[in-house]
Image (cartoon, grey):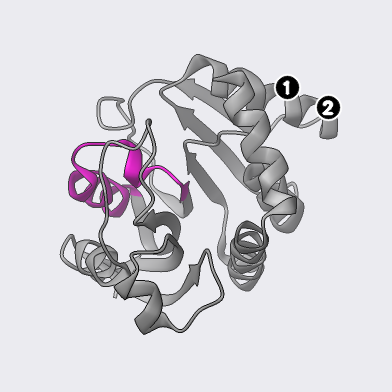
Amino acid sequence: MLPYMVGLAISQYLWETHRAIFEFFTLEIRRRRGQVRTYLEIGPGHGLFLDRALSELGHGAAATAVDISPTSIDITRAIMEFFRPNAANVTYRTGDIMMLDMPERFDFITMGEVLEHVDAPGRLLKKVGSLMAPGGGAFVSTCANCPAIDHVYQFNSVDEIRALITGNGLRIERDLALPAEKLPMDEVIKRRITVNYCAMVTSHESH
């Protein structure tokens, strides 16, 4: 798990599509800066998104990081303590978000590269919606046509991802689809080339 997380963190800067997704996330968290008092990250992994969120939100926001992997939580905590040794506004919880008792509601939820690692991503999206405060939003990222040994669920197209999001009580405000190769989208679809995808979503119930 540790080498995987380190590699993922490095790719955040070296892989063009991952950089673009990180920039998309930064703009979205910045767009909602004045509205976010509570922040939740599901599967913080290397901790870079959490660090960026706190940089944008400032000290007034309380953050919670949840991961099923103790190693991931340890890495996230270590990174946060290195960059923010005096931060007292972050709570770390180890466990399955579907099983944890989470009475709080959050103004902004981040769930990056998690959907492909669960066998029922629709249920997880519904959970995200239930954890969203009125007027809140969530940043979600995943990929299509990206087989890997640790990917439990395989999305076959970006349209399939969008349909799953909207079919589970969420509305897509903005999204970004980034093929791994610079080719026309019809060629990407025909050749089943990996596409990295991210979206800013809100709950229908919050409108």
Task: Locate the C terminus by quadrant.
Answer: bottom left
The x, y position of residue 124, in whole percent, is: 26, 44
Task: Locate the N terminus by quadrant.
Answer: top right
Residue 118 part of the magenta-drawn span: yes
Residue at the extreme left of the image, as rendered: 167
Q: Main secondary structure of the magenta part?
A: helix
Tell me where residue 20 sits by quadrant.
bottom right
Q: Which residue is mark 2?
A: 82
User: How many C-alpha atoms fall within 10 Å of the one at disc 2: few (<14), some, or many (≥20)?
Assistant: few
Q: Which residue is mark 1?
A: 78
Q: Which residues are magenta?
A: 111-131
Tell me where residue 6 sits by quadrant.
top right
Q: Is residue 54 left or right of residue 206?
A: right
Q: Residue at x 70, y 48 (%)?
A: 54
Badge 2 amino acid: Phe
Q: Residue at x 34, y 69 (%)?
A: 191
86 in relation to 32, above or below: above
Rounded to the nearest angstrom, the CA distance separating label 2 from label 1 is 6 Å
Q: In the rendered structure, are the residues bearing label 2 and label 1 in contact, judged by CB atoms less than 8 Å apart?
A: yes
Q: Residue at x 68, y 39 (%)?
A: 9
The x, y position of residue 149, in whole percent, is: 37, 31
> From this viewpoint, is residue 85 visible?
no
